[in-house]
Amino acid sequence: MPLVEIKKLYLLAHNEEREAILELLQRLGSVELVDLQESPEWAEIRVLLEPGQAGGAVSRLEANLGEVRYCLDFLQRYFPIRKNFIQQFTGSRLELTAQEYSDYIASAREIDAVYGACRKAEEDLTRIRNEETRYRSLLAELKPWIGFSLPLEEVIKSNCVSMDLVTIPLESYPALIESLKADAPDFYLEEFSTDKDLAYCLLIYMTDDSAVVSSLFKNAAANPVDFSHLTGTAADATLSVEQRLSALEQERSAVLAKVEALLEQRPLLMACFDYLDNERAKLEAFSNLACTQSSFLLKGWVPLPDLDELEKELRAQAETAVLVIRDPDENEAVPVLMANRGPVAAYEVVTRLYSVPRRDELDPTPFMAPFFFVFFGICMADVGYGIILSLLAFFISRKLKLAGMGKQLVDLLFWGGIASVVFGIVFGGYLGDFFGLAPLWFNPLEDPITMLIFCFSAGLFHIYFGMGIQAYRSIKAGKLLDALLDQGLWLVFLSSLILIALPQFSTPAKWVVIACAVLLVLTQGRKQKGLLKKFFSGLGSLYNITGYLSDVLSYSRLLALSLSTAVIATVINVMGKLMAGSLLGYLFMAIILTGGHFFNMLIGVLGAYVHTSRLQYIEFFGKFFEGGGRPFRPFRLTHKYIDVLKWNRGQ
Amino acid sequence: MEGIVLALLGVALAVGLSGIGSAIGVGLVGESAAGLVTEDPDKFGQTLLLQALPMTQGIYGLLTGLVIMINLGIFTGEVASLTVTEGLSMLMASLPVALVGFLSAIAQGRAAAAGIGLIAKRPEEMGKAITFAVMVETFAVFSVLVSLLLLLFM
Amino acid sequence: MTLARDTSFAYAVGRIRALETRLLDRSKLERMIDAASADEAIKILAETDYGSAVAELAAVHDFEEILQREMALTLAELEKMSPQKDLIALMRLRYDVLNLKILLKAKYLQVKAELLLPLGTVPLSTLQAMVDEERFRDLPGPLRSALDRIMEEFPLTRDPQMIDLALDRVLFEQLMAEAARLQSPFLKGLFARQIDLINLKTFIRVKRMERDRDFFKKAVLPGGRLPLDRLISLFDEPLDALHGQLSRTDYATLIEEGVRGWMEKGSSALLEKLADDYITTYLQRGKRSAFGPEPLIGYLWAKEIEVKNIRLILVGKINKLSADAIRERLRDVYL
């Protein structure tokens, strides 16, 4: 399938219409902008241009965006919106009508207030947290002194007598008392409590001895505690601190209530974020342009099918704009857009996960899609699982508004379910052997060799098909010889190798094989220089036979996966039926059957998807497809938080 | 009757070894995923998918074990009597999936755990992270295939 | 004991991968540089992970507190997630030595100890007490004997540089020994590179001080990737010989540009920046390994660089430096 033709576009218009035109392009979303400064044209037009772009507007928008982002993050921190399991894959967005969206944007001025409120709330919360920590540690400090009945403000130092509340390490406690007795004999010491390291004491001593006492303290690692800022006894102080703490708790809930009230503004924030982000993208797009004093030039890529609409809309919006369409040059980095229709479109996701085709390549999706369908079906091969899978995929795509690769993936699974039904009928899988229905063709469990041969044949066909496409490409590129020698010869060689296995063909096939081998040795090295090099390179190419062999063997995974689905389903049925009998037994049977089959289906889908993909990537694409193209990324509106249900401008 | 002991050893090895391998592999991816989800809870779904990948070896082992058990008639209640040679053949048939399942599940676990890092940075590239891990599984598929063919044709 | 099995780091690496996405990227830093004032720059910082810390900030000038807290948090988090605690302790050792240097100089030169970083393995108060009382018995062996030696020698020479040299030497001896004990070529490579960079800086500094070769010989640290005798033999030749001799090593551009900058402008700022960038490049392998300690060490370094960059920008903004002057010194980011 050829890729969508992409044209090069130049747009020349007056500066007054610059913003309107970019807005139009962003809304249509069909043009990929090219930075003119990085284009080869730049050198020619540079002299004509006005230097400098207004960067101020962008940074102002950045600042606004920063505020909105801060508010959203802040709200998310305290009142998170959690995504459910499916949304973690697809993302979740708020749905707004066009009217609601424009209303929100009209009231964007309110964001300042919300931002202020968020900042204030965060500051309050931090302050409350800090105060709480302070009070908590004060509480812990006060605890050992609860038994001390003197009001704390009366622990004073007068000219004559000094009082200290002091903590003394137990190990230096006796020594301290001894040295106090020796150096400052007029003292009074009372111990209030001890814990495992420290004794908590009141010491009264003569003020004249202060210096001695404090050096004794230092030696004993004793620490005077300062509670002079508190009033009342330690017990009173504890009580008041506790009251203060509960007041803080109340204050916190008050602040959180205010934050919760702000949640009402979350849709506004979300809408404005998306709006501002798109505005910023638009302004940033200015830097791609080349401007003179009164006009500007824009360069971009546009898919041919979108061109008509673009021209029509442009003519309606901007009278002075001049549109020039050119074919891209040979060596330009043209982006690539795949366009598949109908069910095949779903399979684009498989190609995309590998790589986007190069500009001069074919889109492999339509060739790959039927194989993917068949192989997926063989791996699952169960009517029951297929129906469940298709229904699940159908409801997910109905319920969630998916776009892009997410939608393609769900569609892919839908078609996978259909394939599973088809091959379930062929191989007789109806929730394993639950219904005991006969297969249309044969049961792989009973005849795995036939199944293996079938898988290898399917694989061989797949590989031949891939080689055929490469041959077609070579022929189209005028390299008939390459097609004949690199693909044709190999096709004959491989086929006759297989025919040797059949007795009636074995003798002629042998001669064909030998002839082909000789020809391959002679021709495969033709691109090398030097006779010897040509010969050895040709000889070495025979080694590729192992590559083809392992390619074909790789398709045995189809058998392994289909057996695994079928056997596990069978065992689930056996185990379920073992339970049957009593009422409770039937209940257990129902649980085992439902849970078991659902689990088996999930594992089956995962295995079928990844292994079928692998067969396409390694065995099939390897034959003709390289990829490495640059996907087409149009300049368009993007939405992170909201979905506008119906875009209707000017409302 | 001694043959049945050997056949049961085959069941034990197939289910046991590949199960251990899967447990190590899944556990490793789980650790890595838990690290990522600690910081970014919304990645739970994507990482779960990667974590499931090294599980298949255990399932292949289970599958092989179940086929041996069906062959023995354990589910029908009429346990067949086996010679030592027959029992030994079943044991041998279980070895490919037991050994390859064990080691490939661990190797796949490493590849998938590395994929967790890929998802952390580029969630949109999940398909590639899965593809890398699945390449390892090829060999487990081959081994289960040989085990099954041996069992079904003996 | 060797390093824990690489897969035992799986959980930690998973977390690091997510944390890395929250590091400030170049464009955020650029926006801070382009901000009109320090206050504006702080506002941009408030939109990032530093947001809640910024909310507590009383005045712009107190930003250092935020940065220190961020580093302390990072180290604590890494310690919690690392399957091997001593790995992070090893990285903290640098801060112990840094603090000791400051404290010792403060003690001997009778100045106030400033810019202490509470990020080491030993609490600052304990370190302070040790220095006050000149009792280092609680420190690991090599460090203790180095400090005892300083205590003996300093009163004789009164040369503050000697403190730096002796402590750097013992730090890297210790680090290299640990790297060998853990059998980690990655850590060994990191420390050897850091030794080289210090030696190169010492080379230039000693040359500019016009001290002799013997002095340089005493100052260089062993264990780097550049052979010591080659460096020492280069010392008596003109600076160009250094370029010439090392032009084949991966230090070539660093010497070329950094040293020229130092000679021309008389400031080592560019060389310091290039040295940091060099280590960043080495550690960036941590972005690619799915297991093992590399991502942890890489992330720690990334944070250090980030903090350094924020400090650079804010100090620059407060002192009204031009955007270009700030940009010149900005370290490459790890991302």
Image (tube, helix red, strand yellow):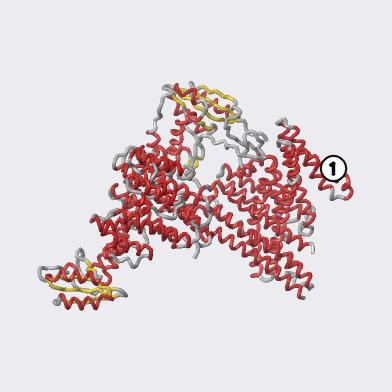
Residue topped by disc 1:
A512
In the rendering, at what x and y percent does residue C217 appear? 38, 52
Q: Is residue A393 left or right of residue A190?
A: right
Amino acid carrying label 1: it is Val
In the rendering, at what x and y percent does residue B119 appear? 53, 50
Q: Is residue A419 left or right of residue A145?
A: right
**At numbered mark 1, what does the secondary structure look like: helix, strand or loop?**
helix
Instruction: Please identify the quarter of the rendering in which residue A436 is found.
Output: bottom right
Residues A529 and C299: in front is A529
Q: Is residue C180 left or right of residue C161?
A: right
- Chain of the residue under label 1: A
Q: Residues within 10 Å of mark 1 (few under 14, many from 20)?
A: some
Q: Quadrant of the N terminus of chain A?
A: top right
Instruction: Please identify the quarter of the rendering in which residue C94 is found.
Output: bottom left
Where A325 sits versus A158, above or below? above
Where B20 sits versus A49, above or below? below
Residues C131 and B18: in front is C131
Instruction: Please identify the quarter of the rendering in which residue A629 is found.
Output: top right
| Rendered residue at 60%/39% (across/down) | A628
Q: How many marks?
A: 1
In the rendering, at what x and y percent does residue C147 appear? 33, 62
Residues A422 and C162: in front is C162
Q: Is residue A250 visible?
A: yes
| Rendered residue at 44%/55% (across/down) | C223
